[in-house]
Image (cartoon, rainbow, N blue to C red):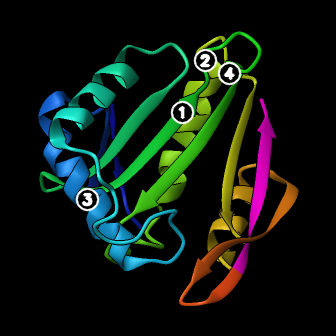
Amino acid sequence: MKTITTKKGQEIILRYPAREDAKQVVEFYNMVGAETEYLSFCGGEYRVTPEQQEKMIAEANSSENSTMILAVADDEIVGIGTISSNQKIKGRHVGTLGIVVAEKYCNTGIGRSMMDELIMWCRLNGITRKISLVTSQENKGAIALYEKCGFEAEGILKNEICIDGRFSNLVYMGLMI
């Protein structure tokens, strides 16, 4: 797809996944699940097999309104961005955004670059008219990024997350395109 340069001067390739990336995608999700409380799963909870992930990659690569992009540094996945869309007529115009960046690559511009690519992809696909996302109300950095990209808060889901007995809220955000 394209090469970007991080704020630290490192070159990162943004590209669509291949079926051969499936095992590394699963490993990446399980790794980042252990790095942050802001994902919907913890370390080791991404229970998708490489074979299932291969099918998911194939589906995303052939879909008109769902996609996945990888951020790759030195042949290692350092970020994943997705747009997941309903295939039913009434809801296929809404894509749900997911972005995750490995902790050591946070605040380098990778997340913003993936956001820009995914928003542009949605604008060009001829189907997507709204992008939605859900994030922890405590994830101030992500919320600031989403707002810079034009997303607006549309609602609060109270006590949706419980970590170690502590409840926190999720923010539902949307962007009309």
Q: Amino acid at mark 2?
A: Leu
Q: Is residue 46 left or right of residue 93?
A: left
Q: From the viewer's perspective, is the residue at label 2 or at label 3 nearer?
A: 3
- Most foreground residue, 148 or 69: 69
Secondary structure mainly formed by the magenta segment: strand
Q: Which residues, given as a range, are shown in magenta?
A: 168-177
Where does the image place residue 66, in percent across and percent down from the top left? Answer: 50, 25
Residue reaching furthest to the right: 154
Q: Which residue is mark 2?
A: 124
Q: Tell me: 5 left or right of 114.
A: left
Which of the marked residues, 2 or 3, is nearer the chain's N terminus?
A: 3
The span from disc 1 to disc 3 (Cα, nearest Å) is 18 Å
Task: Give the class, few, some or many, for how many residues have Cα within 10 Å of label 4's Cα (few <14, many ≥20).
Answer: many
Tag 4 residue: 128
Disc 1 element: strand
Label at residue 97: none
* Quadrant housing the N terminus: top left
| Element marked by disc 4 | loop
Name the residue type under label 1. Ser
Question: Image quarter for residue 90?
Answer: top right
Q: Give me the residue at 24% from left, 51% from top.
A: 26
| Residue under label 1 | 84
Mark in front: 4 vs 1:
1
Q: Is residue 48 above or below residue 102?
A: above
N-term-proximal mark, 4 vs 3: 3
State left or right for residue 78 relative to residue 146: left
Residue at (34, 63) in percent of width and height:
45
